[in-house]
Amino acid sequence: MLGKCAYLLGYYVKLEDTLQKIVYPYRVKLKNEFEETATMYIREGPIRRLYAKVEPEKNFRVVPSVGAEYYMWAGAGAKSFLAFMSGPERDKLISEAERLIPKTILDRKTLDEAIMLVRKRGYALSLDEYSEGFSSIAGPVVNDRDEALCTIAVTGPSTRFSEDKLSEIGERIKEYCVELSRLFGWPGPFDGEKWVFPFLFSKKPQKCLRYRPTIINGFCKRHRGDINKG
């Protein structure tokens, strides 16, 4: 059992590293174009983890710590993951939601609409929902099983994100996520389809079978510390 555990852990770490290397140039382009911090998150069970980041040369910027854990029910990255989960799995995570700051979305109808909007337009927004004074725009990298492998995001002080800039960043993230998703087997985009990421299956699979760096056959789970609340 120990040998199998070590093998699987090494296998999934290698997959994560491959994903990070492929996504890296896109994060650099986002950082250079918008002069804000560009990040990549992966899912680890009920939380998401900041796996990598690139930062602009600005005096005042967001400096999230690589390895930090974030809740799965709040923030742009969370919505991007939730949009590609099965209904029961999504319901379970959302049921644990609590207010972090005044603008944290807790109304289920509002949150569901924001989650489905990720599939429709290709990205999610978080405007002072997770940390006061900071906003982010995130999109999913999707595989051929309609699963979000990771999310890429741009994060910065809310005062620097005008409505036009939010839209511009969102459209660029959508463009990059579509490109990246195609590299991982996603069959879109689809002619005549209004949604960027339409449902590929009438019934989504309950378990990820191809690329899931978070759960390794129920064992070898990584140590988790305190979840980042800000």
Image (cartoon, rainbow, N blue to C red):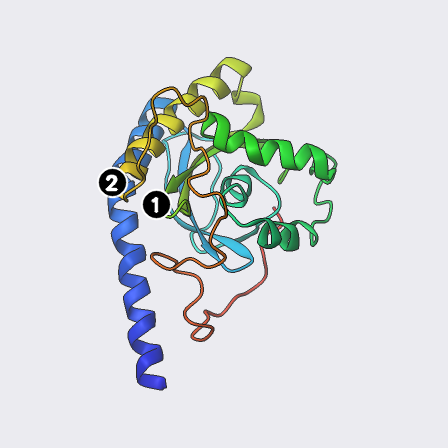
Q: Quadrant of the N terminus?
A: bottom left
Q: Secondary structure at mark 1?
A: loop
Neighbourhood count class around disc 1 (C-alpha, 10 Å): few under 14, some 14–19, many 20 upward = many
In this rendering, the answer to whether 98 lies above or below 112 is below
To which quarter of the image does residue 196 belong? Answer: top left
Q: Which residue is mark 2?
A: 183
x, y percent for residue 34: 38, 23
In the rendered view, tell whether residue 155 sits above or below residue 34.
Answer: below
Q: Is residue 133 visible?
A: no
Image quadrant assignment for residue 170: top left
Q: Image check: 46 left or right of 175? A: right
Would residue 79 be found to the left or right of residue 11 on screen? right
For the point 28% across and 55% down, which residue is it?
A: 17
- Dot 2 or dot 1: first in sequence order is 1
Q: Residue furthest top?
A: 164
For the residues marked 2 and 1, what is the alpha-carbon distance in whole angstroms?
A: 8 Å
On the rendered structure, is 6 left or right of 70? left
Residue at the location (41% across, 23% down)? 193
Viewed as shown, does residue 140 lie left or right of 114?
left
Q: SS for tag 2?
A: helix
Total number of numbered discs in the rendering: 2
In the image, what residue type sits under mark 1? Answer: Asn
Where residue 59 appears, as percent x and y from the top left, is: 45, 31
Residue 190, placed above or below residue 46: above
Mark 2 surroundings within 10 Å by alpha-carbon count, few (fewer than 14), some (14 through 19), many (20 or more): some
Can residue 101 be seen?
yes
Residue 184 spot, x, y in % from top left? 28, 44
- The residue to which callout 1 is attached is 143
x, y percent for residue 42: 42, 51
